[in-house]
Image (cartoon, helix red, strand yellow):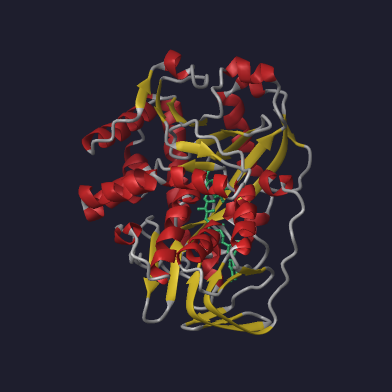
């Protein structure tokens, strides 16, 4: 596998899009019933459902850059409802019944997303071919087994455990000892989803203003550099970028994550690897690598650790990250040696949002009219649909079953002030690196690091 042809950093998804409409910035005084800040998936889905549930409302969506500029236009394209860490956390906090109610509702978002993409004629290459999770060392086998045990205890019986030969019928990953296949993942071209949703909400009467950055949010008012907006409800959908709003510096931690994409690969590669349809593949390291086969036969590779900048900075989300890109390249050729010699054509970074307790949340306070949703810990493609539906139901005062889910109204505690935040996050990340190295070298479960990571992740 040869290096990227250019040092320029740019999301494959954003670069593939046809030219988009210019949406002018907002100037002066504006009024709306609801203003939504951020045109990523959360903001767009909220606008979509709100314009459906309460078509009489005047909805204004403002975006600091352009539609899909944030994580929604830069992710790995796994539209998945497999979220083992979240499921475990919800069951621990709320009990099996509420945790499972959330999980079962989340499961149905794939149907709902597919329905909307069809209804709105959004061509985003949606294909629901499932996920293959592979274990390539004994500790990874143990972790995969523990995940299956947790599922079985909760009555979830839809992950099929496969030996190396059976796993090879989905994708032949070098060194596979054990694998789990689940059907609950689709792949999408995420920037196309965002662009399509933006067009769909505009058709429903929502106004989108790009290049309009909210600086300050108070009940009933949003201040931008060139406008003052008055609205009954103000919803923040800024995820990793939330710290840029006055007074919100410690609410959401921005995690910098990276991905690369190969050139379109020849048919011989797909035959050699036995890749079934567009199944997604991931390994089971702490700092896992994940793979997405695109419509035009590229391999998108992401993961292998994530970064944090002191002071919750997000500028690295647009930068070249040579060390991670090299790690991703190495992971890809190690797991799929047939990639050797193929070029990487795109590499990019983005920032996703993490709450202090790693649980996403949807919050709306009817008295102040303030609301927000996010904190999906890097798993927001499917969840943002559920969050948008929930938030829209609450704001539109429509009785919806989603409003009763345990994440509604959940407020995670704030992150520690710096430098504690930096030291803690960097420390956990270093432990994950050490644990993976130890396990790769010894084929034994990392004792201390593994324990700490299981406790904090
Ligand atoms: C590299 C990477 C890979 C990922 N892979 C996956 C994956 O495979 N599967 C998955 O489920 N999830 C994945 N994620 C996570 C997923 O992309 C996010 O959870 C999801 O896109 C969050 O959507 P959002 O709308 O809440 O936030 P964003 O998409 O980040 O949108 C927030 C928007 O708000 C705007 N904004 C910020 N501040 C302001 C302001 N003050 N005023 C106005 N606008 C503002 C931003 O410009 C941005 O457009 C990945 C993330 C990254 C970075």
- Among all residues in the image, which is located at the extreme top? 165
Location of residue 415 by image quarter: bottom left
- Determine whether 16 is above or below 39 in the image: above
- 93 or 177: nearer the eye? 93
Whole-percent x and y of residue 432? Answer: 44, 43
Whole-percent x and y of residue 213? Answer: 63, 73
Quarter of the image containing the N terminus?
A: top right
Q: Which residue is at a point 72% across and 44% down the rendered structure image?
A: 16
Q: Which residue is at a point 48% across and 61% down the rendered structure image?
A: 49
- Determine whether 128 is above or below 418 in the image: above
- 158 or 213: nearer the eye? 158
Is residue 455 visible in the rendered structure shown here? no
Is residue 101 visible in the rendered structure shown here? yes
Whole-percent x and y of residue 247? Answer: 48, 78
Numbered-mark total = 0
- Determine whether 425 is above or below 75 in the image: below
Quadrant holding ligand 1? bottom right
Q: Which residue is at a point 71% across and 30% down the rendered structure image?
A: 264
Task: Decide if residue 173 is on the left or right side of residue 90.
Answer: right
Whole-percent x and y of residue 300? Answer: 62, 36
Task: Decide if residue 415 is on the left or right side of residue 300.
Answer: left
């Amino acid at each position: 596998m040869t290096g990227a042809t250019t040092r320029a950093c740019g999301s494959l998804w954003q670069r593939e899009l046809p030219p988009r409409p210019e949406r002018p910035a907002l100037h002066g005084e504006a009024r709306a019933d609801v203003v939504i800040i951020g045109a990523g998936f959360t903001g767009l889905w909220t606008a979509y459902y709100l314009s459906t549930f309460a078509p009489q409302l005047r909805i204004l969506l403002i975006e600091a850059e352009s539609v899909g500029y944030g994580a929604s236009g830069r992710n790995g394209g796994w539209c998945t409802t497999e979220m083992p860490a979240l499921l475990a956390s919800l069951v621990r906090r709320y009990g099996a019944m509420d945790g499972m109610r959330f999980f079962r509702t989340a499961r149905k978002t794939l149907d709902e997303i597919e329905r909307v993409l069809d209804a709105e004629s959004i061509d985003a290459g949606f294909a629901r071919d499932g996920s293959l999770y592979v274990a390539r060392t004994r500790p990874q086998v143990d972790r995969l087994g523990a995940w299956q045990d947790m599922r079985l205890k909760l009555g979830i019986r839809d992950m099929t455990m496969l030996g190396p030969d059976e796993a090879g019928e989905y994708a032949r990953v070098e060194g596979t000892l054990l694998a789990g296949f689940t059907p609950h993942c689709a792949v999408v071209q995420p920037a196309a989803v965002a662009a399509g949703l933006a067009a769909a909400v505009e058709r429903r009467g929502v106004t989108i203003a790009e290049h309009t950055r909210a600086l300050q949010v108070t009940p009933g008012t949003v201040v931008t550099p060139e406008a003052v907006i008055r609205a009954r409800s103000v919803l923040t959908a800024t995820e990793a970028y939330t710290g840029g709003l006055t007074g919100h510096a410690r609410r959401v931690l921005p995690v910098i994550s990276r991905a690369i994409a190969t050139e379109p690969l020849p048919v011989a590669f797909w035959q050699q690897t036995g890749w079934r349809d567009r199944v997604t593949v991931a390994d089971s390291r702490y700092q896992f690598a994940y793979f997405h086969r695109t419509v035009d036969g590229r391999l998108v590779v992401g993961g292998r650790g994530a970064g944090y900048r002191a002071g919750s900075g997000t500028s690295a989300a647009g930068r070249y990250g040579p060390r991670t890109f090299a790690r991703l390249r190495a992971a890809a050729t190690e797991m799929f040696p047939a990639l050797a010699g193929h070029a990487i054509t795109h590499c990019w970074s983005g920032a996703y949002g993490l709450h202090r307790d790693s649980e996403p949340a949807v919050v709306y306070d009817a008295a102040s009219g303030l609301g927000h949703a996010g904190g999906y810990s890097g798993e927001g493609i499917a969840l943002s649909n559920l969050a948008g539906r929930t938030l829209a139901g609450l704001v539109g005062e429509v009785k919806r079953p989603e409003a009763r889910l345990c994440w509604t109204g959940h407020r995670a505690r704030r992150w520690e002030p710096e430098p504690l935040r930096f030291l803690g996050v960097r420390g956990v990340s270093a432990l994950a690196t050490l644990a993976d190295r130890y396990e790769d070298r010894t084929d034994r479960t990392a004792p201390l690091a593994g324990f700490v990571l299981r406790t904090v992740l």
